[in-house]
């Protein structure tokens, strides 16, 4: 079994912030963590330098292609533009 991998980046959440399961909308400077375990991708966000992590609404994802740094970069760009509806736009249609 492949070991879980994790990717993290700090970014300013775009207009509308980021919708989370536990805390509602998160805004401002955040850290985004993409955790890849097998075909499951969990995406979490936290206020910069905070202790608590919140799962982004719509996580976990099942990517259409190989998850990794490219998927994490795509998620970070989406956070930069704002994810007020969570990850719905990133869900594969297949």
Image (spheres, rainbow, N blue to C red):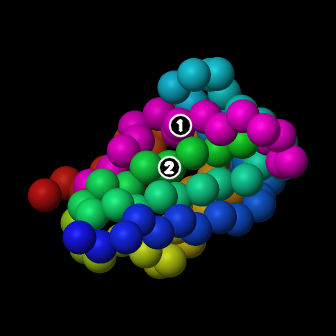
Q: Residues within 10 Å of mark 1 (few under 14, many from 20)?
A: many
Give the structural element (helix, strand or loop) at label 1: strand
Give the structural element (helix, strand or loop) at label 2: strand
Q: Main secondary structure of the magenta part?
A: loop
Give residue 11's position: percent from left, percent from top: 77, 59
94 lies left or right of 40: left
For the question of whether residue 77 can be seen, the reply is: no
Among numbered discs 1 and 2, the one appearing first in the sequence: 2
Depth check: give the residue in front, 92 or 6.
6
Instruction: Tell me the magenta residue range.
Output: 47-62
Residue at image x 38%, y 55%? 41
For the question of whether residue 31 can be seen, the reply is: yes
According to the picture, the residue beneath numbered tag 1 turns out to be: 55
Examine the structure image and report whether residue 75 is included in the region drawn in magenta. no
> Does the residue at mark 1 contact the one at mark 2 (Cβ under 8 Å)?
yes
Whole-number angstrom distance, CA of label 1 to CA of label 2? 6 Å
Residue at image x 29%, y 73%? 2
Give residue 6's position: percent from left, percent from top: 53, 65
């Amino acid at each position: 079994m492949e070991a879980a991998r994790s990717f993290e980046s700090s970014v300013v959440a775009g207009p509308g912030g980021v919708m989370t399961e536990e805390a509602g909308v998160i805004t401002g400077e955040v850290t985004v963590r993409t955790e890849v375990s097998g075909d499951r991708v969990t995406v979490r966000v936290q206020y910069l330098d905070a202790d608590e992590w919140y799962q982004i609404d719509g996580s976990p994802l099942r990517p259409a292609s190989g998850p990794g740094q490219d998927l994490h970069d795509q998620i970070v760009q989406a956070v930069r533009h704002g994810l007020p509806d969570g990850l719905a736009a990133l869900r594969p249609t297949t």
